[in-house]
Amino acid sequence: MSQMPQQAAVSKCPSCEEPLESGDRFCGACGYDLSAVPPRPDDHPTVAVGGAVPAPAPAPDGVDWPAARDSDGNGRPVPVHAAAELPGTDSGGSPLPPPPAAPPVPSAPPAPGVRFDRPREPEEYPLQAPDPRLTASAAPHAEQGAEPAAPAAPAAAPAAADKVCVACRAGRVDDDGYCENCGHAQPRERDHMEQESGPVAAVSDRGLRHHRNEDAFSVGCTALPDGAPASVAIVCDGVSSATRPDDASLAASRAAGELLLTALPRGTHPQQAMHDAILAASHAVNALADEPATAREQGPHQNAPACTLVGAVVTAGLLVVGWVGDSRVYWVPADRATPPARLTEDDSWAAQMVAAGLMNEAEAYADERAHAITGWLGADAYELEPHTASFKPDRPGVVVVCTDGLWNYAESAEEMADAMPLDAATRPLHGARVLVGHALDGGGHDNVTVALVPFPAVPQGAGSA
C-alpha cells in the first residue's frame, strides 16, 4: 500500500494538540519544547521483536527536519525536561501566563518503531507469536506506512462483551474485523475450527494458500430407539468456482447433520437417513440461489452456490457412508493388522476416465482435469445422485471423513493410515489435528477438513484423553 506523504513541519503540539505556527520553538498553550520532537519513522513494526530497535530511517531529500537538542550524535535526543519545567514565551519573548493543566507528558520521546497513537508498551509485552497462516492473511489489510495520528490518551479497556484484538490484546475489534487500536486484521472465525462431540472430533483449517475457509462440518452423537449409541459426521467442501461456496458448505453440513440427529432416534435406518440427509443438504444449498432480483442484477453472470458432501454414521455394528462429489471416507483398523480401505468413489473427471477404462488411476489423477467434479450440491447441478453404502467391520477402527485438502497429501488408504496416529481411536481430536498438520506440512494448497469417528460407536460421554 502506498504511503501518505509526511509533512515537513509540525502542525499541532504533540502534548496538548493546540495549533502551532511556523517557526515556533515552544507551544504557546502548554510550553512544550517542540525541538525535542523526533521525526516520525517511515514504516517500522509496532513492537520491536526481541527488544531490537530498528535504526531511524534517513530524512527524505529536501526536508529540513529540526535537529533535536542535545543529540547523542546518532540522531536520537537525550531525555529532555517536561514541558512544565520550562518557562514559555510568546513570539515577542514575553513570559506566558501559567498554562492550564495538561495530560502528563513522558519524560522521553518514544523510541523509533513505536506507534505514536498507542500507549507505551511494557518491556515484556505479553504477545503470543502470531500464527504464520494468520500473518499472511492479515498483512494485506494492515495500514502499512500510514501517517500516525497525534498522541492520545490510552483507550479505555474494552467492555466484557467486546471482542479483544489478538495482536495488541487491548483494542476492541470493530464490525469489519479490524482492531480499533492497532488496525490488525483479526482471524476469521472459520479460519480454524475444532469441535469434539463425545467420541467424535473434527478439525477444519483455511490452509496456507486460500484467503478463506470454504469447508464446513457437523459432528454429533445420538442414540437409536433401543438405546444403542450412534455417531454422525458430515464434511462439506465449497466449490470455489461457484458463488458463496462458504455459505453453501455451511448450509449443507448443518442441514444434513440436523436431519441425521433427528431421524436416527426415531428408528429410521441409518442408510435411509443418510440418503435423506443428502437431499436435505441439497435443498438447503438450492435455497441460497433464491436471491433478490437486485442481487442478480448486480451479478447476472454469477453461478449458483455449490459444495460437495461426505458423511458417515457409525453404530454398534454398522457403518454407513454417503457422498456427492470428491470428498472421501477411509477405514483404518485400530490394530493395523488388516489393510485400510477407501470406502467412497469420487464424482470426478479422473474417476470417470478410470471407470471407462480410458486411463489408469495414475494417468487420470496426473491430468490437470483430474479434480473437475461431476457431482455436487447446488441449483445448477445436472442431476442429484446421492451415493450411500453400508459396511459391517469385523474389528474396531477409525472412520476418516475428509475433503480433498487432506487426501491430496495422503491419497491411498495406506498413506492415510500412515499419517494418522496409532491412538486416534481413543484420542480423535488429537488425531484430527495431526492429519490437518500433515496437509499443512505438505503445502496446504487447499482448505483442510477432517472428522474422525471411532468404530464401533462409543456411548456418549467418552472422548479424547
Image (cartoon, grey):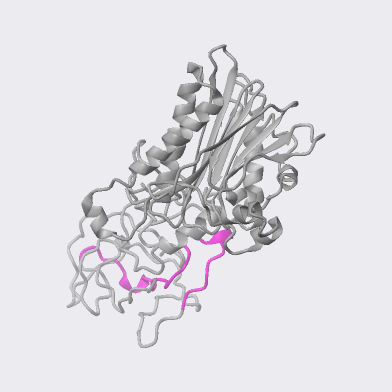
Residue 315: quarter of image: top right
Q: Toward the viewer: 114 or 298?
A: 298
Residue at the spot x=45%, y=23% of the render? 262
Residue 372: quarter of image: bottom right
**Does 116 sit above or below residue 419?**
below
Position of 336 with respect to 206 (left or right) is: right
> Whole-percent x and y of residue 390?
62, 30
Residue at the spot x=25%, y=68% of the render? 12
Q: Toward the viewer: 415 or 443?
A: 415
**Does 25 sit above or below residue 99?**
below
**Magenta stretch: includes residue 45:** yes
**Magenta stretch: includes residue 279:** no
> Whole-percent x and y of residue 254?
44, 35
Residue at the spot x=50%, y=20% of the render? 268
Position of 415 with respect to 80 (left or right) is: right
* Residue 460 seen: no
Q: Which residues are magenta?
A: 29-57
* Residue 387 seen: yes
